[in-house]
Image: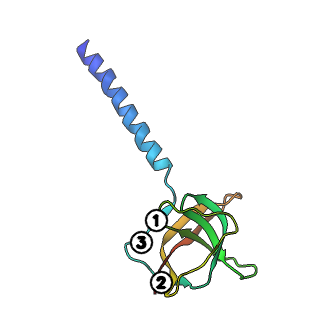
Amino acid sequence: MVKNILLFVSGIIVGVVATFIFAVVSTNSGIVRFDEPGKEITSSPLQVIQVLSEGVALAEEHHVKYSDKLIVLLVSEGEHFYDDQIVYLSDGDTFKQIGVYTYNTNMGIKKTVPIVEALPK
């Protein structure tokens, strides 16, 4: 009898832990950050085309007609983006790649784009 109760309780605990692990894995944001900043992506202003979450937005180079170069733009915590916002660099800064972002389009196509952050040249 005690063995059955222990088995039942341990099953509940394992179920709760498995559910928690599944929840963490399934909410993977698709963001992979590099240990060190990579190459310069652009020094041009970027235009936000879609806000993904607080401080994260999908952008493209401003004033580039029919650009197929999408970029995920990250900023410091607490800052917010809005659609069609133009993001300018401070003097001496450039957008450097700090990671990659993977997502699925509405048509189910898997895309990977660079993540950039404004950093000193």
- Give the alpha-carbon distance from disc 1 to disc 2, as whole Å: 16 Å
Which disc number belongs to residue 34?
Answer: 3
Q: Residues within 10 Å of mark 1 (few under 14, many from 20)?
A: some
| Amino acid type assigned to the residue bearing label 2 in the image | Lys
Q: Nearer the viewer, residue 81 or 34?
A: 81
- Residue at 46% from the left image edge and 87% from the top image edge: 121
User: What residue would you read off at disc 2?
Assistant: 39
What SS does tag 3 mark?
loop
Does 79 appear above or below 45?
above
Residue at 31 percent across and 27 percent down: it is: 10
Residue 25 drawn at (x, y percent): 45, 49
Picture quarter containing residue 2? Answer: top left
Seen in the picture, residue 22 relative to 53 is either above or below; the reply is above
Label 1 with label 3: CB-CB less than 8 Å: yes
Q: Secondary structure at mark 1?
A: strand
Residue at the far right in the pictured view: 65
- Name above or below for residue 52 compared with residue 16: below
Residue 32 numbered tag: 1
Residue at 41%, 72% (x, y): give it.
34
Where does residue 16 sit, x and y in percent of width and height? 39, 33
Cα–Cα gap, marks 3 and 2 = 11 Å
